[in-house]
DNA sequence: TGCCCCTTACG
DNA sequence: GTAAGGGGC
């Protein structure tokens, strides 16, 4: 025995903060602590990060290293599969325990279980904590014992709970004699875009990291929450919280948001409830992903397997101009040159700022899957690559919601009219003017589809899908 | 977290 | 002519 307490490791993942971090707290309580981040692109089934997310992660890790340095906690950065890297770092550090906050995707849970087993085999402890969700998805069911499929009763049940108060940031540790295993330089992760470096507008729009996230949360609660319910519907106005990437990367925890909201519920009950329910949708999306691990690829409503959505490599269903036309439509949607102003403004905001106003996300998604008849997975993949808040649960969940194929999704007949939506939610045209300088000039393209005709086609496709389903069910019943 | 069209009432 | 409200998609 050396008489000195054993080293602990805190393994950071989607929780890049120092406050309200139960795993960090547990490690520091146990003794000398080393922090670890593993860029894991090797574990089977783990989804590779999109381009905008990689940019965010780079700056988030730089910020985390700074925040941890104030606590005298060194950050080791490694690359590789969690099951090989984490036990290796634990061994090199001579650590007695590794602490982490739980993840909820299936490949991530498998990786974490493997790590725990390997640690145990080497005589070390692996211990996990709840930090990223207000509720554990396996703890909440309907009275029949099934996972919730409808948001309203889910949130009613969940929000009746009182959630734990957030943990304060810990104080600095005594880091004398701490032997730190070798790691990589942050730059060696190669997360930043080069040739070309397209990150300029991202840097202007966002400051990744815990401190920036906490400031935005505080400003939002102080200044903007009161009008949130109305202002959030106006993409030309700074009315949304802009917290989504900070929640995605764990710079802000949902417990911090929940606690920050509490004192404002009396003076702004409606805006508080609306904003709280957005946290609820986040919880619901993770709940769905936990129960349906293939949420990003498989229709939750199986009848949508018969929907004739277009995917690359397929002929155009109506025998029109063929695959090339649909590829061109997809490209126009991606780059914001459809000739539908609100859709184009949204897609250009996404391409430049790595983020899109939520109202516009719904309109643009509806346009892709309904008016253009393109498979929601292509939209989901584009958002995954371009959003700084691209979330493994919320992104596929929201696309399935827009497509109608999800649990508690928008009914099939709900097809947004981008023109009507622009008139209602951007009445002064500020949002359109901000992102489409050439609007109302000959430079701006003509609409790539007729809104009314394509709406009618979408309803026809959905009706045929439902009717052929009813027929199949009848046939199956008879046999 | 919808859109459209019809009816009705009113001037 | 048009605004408001209801029902179907």
Image (cartoon, coloured by chain):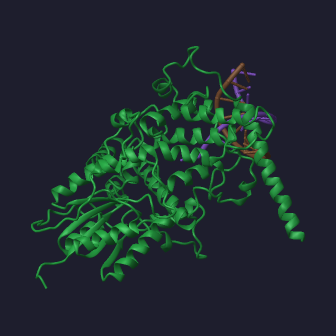
Chain colours: A green, B purple, C brown
Q: Is residue A201 above or below residue A106?
A: above
- With respect to residue A66, does A26 lie above or below? below
Picture coordinates of residue A301 (x, y %)? Answer: 68, 59
Between A459 and A62, the residue placed more toward the observer is: A62
Q: In the rendered view of the protein, which quadrant contains the C terminus of chain A?
A: bottom right
Residue at left offset 10%, top offset 82% = A3
Q: Is residue A80 left or right of residue A468?
A: left
Is A30 positioned to the left or the right of A278 in the image? left
Point out residue A160 in the picture as x, y percentages from the top left corner. 45, 66
Residue shown at 84% from the left, 61% from the top: A472
Query: Is residue A388 in sight in this rendering?
Result: no
Q: Tell me if A336 is positioned left or right of A61 in this view.
A: right
Count the numbered circles shown.
0
Residue A148 located left or right of residue A209: right
Quadrant containing the N terminus of chain A is bottom left
Residue ID at (52%, 66%): A290
Return the residue found at the far top.
A442
Q: Nearer the viewer, residue A89 or A222?
A: A89
Q: Residue furthest right?
A: A478
From the top left corner, tell me how far across and down residue A409 is, in percent. Answer: 63, 54
Q: Return the x and y of residue A321 as percentages of the image width and height.
A: 76, 31
User: In the rendered view, would you say A61 is above or below A7?
Assistant: above
The answer to whether residue A398 shows anywhere in this view is yes
């Amino acid at each position: 025995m050396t008489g000195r307490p054993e080293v602990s490791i805190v393994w950071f993942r989607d929780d890049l903060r120092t406050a309200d971090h139960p795993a960090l707290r547990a490690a520091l309580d146990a003794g000398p602590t080393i922090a670890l981040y593993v860029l894991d692109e090797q574990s089977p089934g783990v989804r590779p990060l999109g381009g905008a997310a990689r940019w965010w992660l780079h700056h988030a890790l730089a910020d985390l290293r700074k925040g941890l340095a104030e606590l005298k906690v060194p950050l080791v950065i490694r690359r590789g599969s969690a099951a090989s890297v984490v036990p290796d770092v634990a061994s090199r550090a001579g650590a007695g325990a590794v602490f982490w906050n739980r993840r909820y995707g299936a490949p991530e849970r498998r990786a974490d279980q493997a790590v725990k087993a390997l640690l145990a085999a080497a005589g070390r402890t692996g211990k996990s904590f709840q930090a990223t969700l207000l509720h554990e998805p396996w703890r909440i069911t309907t009275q029949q014992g099934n996972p919730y499929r409808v948001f309203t009763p889910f949130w009613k049940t969940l929000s009746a709970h009182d959630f734990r108060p957030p943990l304060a940031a810990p104080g600095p540790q005594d880091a004398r004699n701490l032997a730190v295993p070798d790691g990589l330089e942050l730059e060696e992760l190669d997360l930043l875009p080069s040739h070309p470096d397209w990150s300029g507008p991202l840097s202007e729009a966002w400051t990744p990291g815990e401190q920036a996230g906490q400031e935005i949360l505080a400003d939002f609660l102080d200044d903007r929450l009161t009008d949130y319910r109305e202002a959030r519907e106006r993409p030309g106005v700074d009315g949304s919280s802009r917290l989504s990437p900070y929640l995605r990367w764990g710079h802000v925890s949902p417990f911090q948001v929940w606690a920050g909201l509490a004192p404002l519920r009396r003076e702004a009950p409606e805006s508080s409830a609306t904003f709280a329910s957005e946290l609820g949708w986040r919880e619901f999306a993770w709940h769905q992903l936990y129960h349906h691990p293939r949420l990003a690829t498989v229709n939750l409503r199986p009848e949508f397997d018969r929907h004739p959505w277009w995917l690359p490599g397929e002929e155009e269903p109506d025998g029109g101009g063929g695959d090339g036309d649909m590829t061109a439509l997809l490209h126009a949607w991606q780059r914001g040159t459809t000739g539908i102003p609100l859709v184009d403004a949204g897609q250009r905001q996404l391409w430049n700022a790595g983020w899109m106003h939520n109202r516009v996300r719904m309109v643009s998604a509806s346009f892709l899957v309904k008016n253009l008849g393109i498979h929601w997975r292509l939209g989901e993949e584009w958002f995954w690559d371009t959003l700084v808040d691209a979330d493994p649960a919320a992104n596929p969940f929201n696309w399935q919601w827009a497509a109608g194929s999800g649990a508690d999704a928008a009914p099939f007949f709900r097809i947004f009219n981008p023109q009507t939506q622009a008139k209602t939610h951007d009445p002064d045209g500020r949002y359109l003017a901000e992102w489409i300088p050439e609007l109302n000039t000959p430079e701006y393209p003509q609409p790539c589809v007729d809104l009314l005709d394509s709406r009618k086609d979408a309803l026809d496709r959905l009706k045929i899908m439902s009717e052929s389903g009813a027929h199949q069910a009848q046939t199956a019943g008879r046999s």
